[in-house]
Image: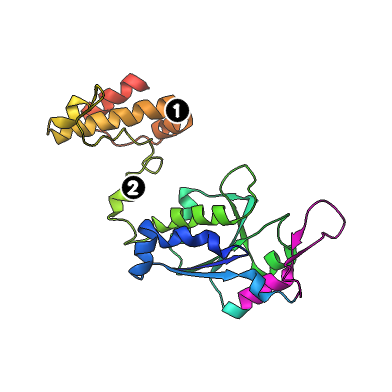
Amino acid sequence: MKINILTIFPEMFAPLRMSMLGRAADNGILEFDITDIRDYTTDKHNRVDDTPYGGGAGMVMQVQPVMDAYDAKGYGGRVIYMSPRGRILSEELARDLAGESEITLLCGHYEGIDQRALDRLGAEEVSIGDYVLTGGELPAMVLVDTVARFIDGVLAGEDSVNDESVYSGLLEYPQYSKPREYGGDEVPEILLSGNHGEIGLWRWEQSLKLTKERRPDLFEKYLKSEPELCKKERAILEKYR
């Protein structure tokens, strides 16, 4: 997948070259093309914003540098504008975007971007939550990371995605590693038993318990989905229903 990013702070995207995303880029699974919108302004002071028509506080990013940057780079695919007024980023949307061969992310600042740019680009507005940040760069990185996990080859295997907290329908169970004992706190004995069937049941029960405690909305949704369960799993579920 090719991921294009239009921003006035390209240096903020350095993390995309690290960890799993960086390896995916090195392996040719992902391609990042990051463009500084300021490089395409015609203003002698290198400005990309101006006061809003109709008055009001703040500044608005202008249509000209945004459109010139987009056209000059020959970007294509679905255009996503990171905006608090947009559709909430979800598993469904992330999976949908992961099926694209190219997407373009537009990062706004100040009071937003001139509506004419959004209209010309046919931009889809996407939000990562009901709060406001200083710009679209951090939301864009959240979207990239979320979408990339659904692309074949980015993670070690498909189960790495499907078993994740929330995507599985339940919150993830507690995890433990070495040492076996630390400051008097020991790893649960069941995890040392070697009985993978019982370990699986224990982990599943922990997921049920945590989900009911912390996200009762997800717990109720899980119950309504009527998951296929074995006899032992169903007995455990009845304890928490």
Residue 28, above or below 137:
below
Q: Nearer the viewer, residue 239 or 101?
A: 101
Residue located at (18% from left, 27% from top): 190
Query: Pointer 1: what residue?
Result: 214
130 with respect to 204 (left or right)? right
**48 inside magenta stretch:** yes
Q: Earlier in the sequence, mark 2 or mark 1?
A: 2
| Residue 29 visible, this angle | no
Q: Nearer the viewer, residue 240 or 19?
A: 19
Query: Pointer 2: what residue?
Result: 162
Give the x, y percent position of residue 29.
Answer: 36, 67
Disc 1: CA contacts within 10 A as few (<14), some (14-19) or many (>=20): few
- The stretch in magenta equals 43-71
The numbered mark at residue 191 is: none
- Cα–Cα span, label 2 and label 1: 20 Å
Residue located at (87% from left, 57% from top): 54
Residue 106, above or below 166:
below
Q: Residue furthest top?
A: 239
Amino acid at dot 2: Asn
**Colouring style:** rainbow
Q: Residue furthest left?
A: 194
Give the x, y percent position of residue 67.
Answer: 67, 73
Q: Quadrant of residue 110?
A: bottom right
**51 inside magenta stretch:** yes
20 with respect to 14 (left or right)? left
Q: Secondary structure at mark 1?
A: helix
Give the x, y percent position of residue 192.
Answer: 15, 31
- Quadrant containing the N terminus is bottom left
Give the x, y percent position of residue 25.
Answer: 38, 67
